[in-house]
Image (cartoon, helix red, strand yellow):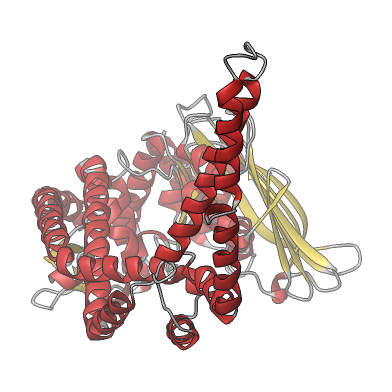
Amino acid sequence: MFDSAGGRANLCLMLRALSIRDVVLIEALDIEAAGGLCALTGETGAGKSILLDSLGLALGARGEAALVRQGAAQASVTACFEIDGANPVFHHLRDQGIEFDAGSDIILRRVLGADGRSKAFINDQPVSIGLLRDVGDMLVDIHGQFETRGLLDPKTHRETLDQFAGTLIQAANVTAAWHGWQAAVNERDALMARIAEAKRDQDYWQQAGDELVALAPRAGEEEELLQRRTMLAAREQIAQSFADAKAFLDEDGGAIPQLNRAWKTLDRVAAKAGDKLNAAIEALDRAVGEVRTATDILDTWFDDEGTGPDTLEAVDDRLHALRAIARKHQCRVDDLAAVLADISDRLAAIRGDDGMLAKLDHAVTQGLKHYHDLARALSDARRKAAAKLDTLVMAELPPLKLDKARFEIAVDAMPESQWGPSGMDAVQFVVATNPGSAAGPINKIASGGELSRFMLAIKVVLAGTTAVPVLVFDEVDSGLGGATADAVGERLARLANAGRQVLVVTHSPQVAARAGQHWIVAKAANDDGAVRTTLVRLDNDKSRAMEIARMISGATVTPEALAAAGKLLQQAS
């Protein structure tokens, strides 16, 4: 990188090279740029605007098929930026999934087909035009009479003021507080919606719950009823079989009396037989116990047989009722108990949500207070900084032939409905170009030439805070001469000396004389007669003096103009 005197400059980023192929009248052009103040001069119509259009393509500006040189299949522009690894643009690219070595060049490339289709690349990785534009905005700020980006876009004014005020961290805290407040609002509103829906359906759920409570369904009841119906269908047969079995076991001549007789018979002779009959006696004893257990079970069945529906009709009625309500709730009979539990939970929630709603209301109130306190402090800081910035910009206006103009930053409180993550303020740069006239948006009130000079004054004041170190000014000196043009040149040089790379398209000899690097843009005919735009670098004082003299006197360079050019160069050095 080079400063305006030709030495190294303390720049962390600059446009190092620009390569243009087949753009309008440019067939092939390669430019190696330097730091500091760089001037592009040349006669009107020579093609200076084509160079800026080409740079704009590489930065993500809108591409039109008309920019492709006639007869060419496509146009391409490559811009190479030298940048250190700490620059924020690296973080932005990594957030977008583009990785490369810290400290490496950033190369933006745009290819525009004759059919109007366009492709974008960053370090040879395909990207969207939107990402190319975002990165371009971070690298270069172009100020032309018809530009609508950068500081001419009101959306940038609030962040620009925060950068100047040193309130970016405050602004980030306000953003975090906003999102916290909104999260509480959303949670509260969602609960309110659920409560409203539940209360609209409360009568239905209450009736459905009462119906299920009265029916008292149990899990597994359907299977029990089916088994009960099978049993009741064969009830007489089962009862007779049970009675016969009990008689065989317990009545006279049945199993138990016979086992008891056998046991007594053996027990009478057990003492005479030693212990040989003990096992048989114990077996008979166990047998009697098992048979008595069987009779007890049969007795129990007879006792329990009366529980539950005692007729087929009752069983069928119960099954019908259960299945009908299951169809109503679109579930299985076995799931009715779970449905009842869910309805109970809904009704309990309706009764209990009031307590939760009160907690969320409190969270919303606290979130709003926290946001309001931070946003109010940010507003106060913004207004103080705006007043300071107004004064500094106003001090730059008189030398730029804007002594009757007024610049101010309007920091207006917005209604609560418009508060947002950026705070409670609407921030806008406004100007009045004549005494007594009302101030209005800078991009609507100022004329093309005035607008460029307003932008120059603002950029000079913001030089220490702006994050974009490559600045391009297109005819910022339009219609100016003498001391005013010299004031423009002095401010452009001041920007360059503040560590910015400044590229200026100029018709002013006073501005061109202050440049550390100077190119002439011209038209020339090729051997085939086709007109092409060329670029010639002036690398010595003699050639620069000749060009500045041409700018002073026109096509015929007079000795007086040459002397005046030498004086301008001497004063600028």
Instruction: Give the residue at the far top of this rendering.
Output: 274
The structure residue drawn at horizontal position 57% and vertical position 37%, both measured from the top left corner, is: 34
Q: Nearer the viewer, residue 68 or 372?
A: 372
**Residue 566 horizontal side relative to residue 414, left or right:** right
Residue 533 sits in quarter? bottom right
The image shows residue 361, relative to residue 62, as above or below, that is above
Looking at the picture, how far across and down is residue 60, in whole percent? 59, 60
The structure residue drawn at horizontal position 24% and vertical position 52%, both measured from the top left corner, is: 180
Q: How many marks?
A: 0
Q: Nearer the viewer, residue 415 or 205?
A: 205
Looking at the picture, how far across and down is residue 32, in whole percent? 66, 40
Q: Nearer the viewer, residue 548 or 336?
A: 336
The structure residue drawn at horizontal position 61% and vertical position 14%, both measured from the top left corner, is: 272
**Residue 496 horizontal side relative to residue 426, left or right:** right
Looking at the picture, how far across and down is residue 545, in whole percent? 54, 44
The image shows residue 386, relative to residue 542, as above or below, that is below
**Residue 379 horizontal side relative to residue 43, left or right:** left
Can residue 430 be seen in the rendering of this structure?
A: no
**Residue 256 horizontal side relative to residue 221, left or right:** right
The structure residue drawn at horizontal position 54% and vertical position 71%, both measured from the top left corner, is: 239
Instruction: Give the residue at the far right of this rendering.
Output: 528
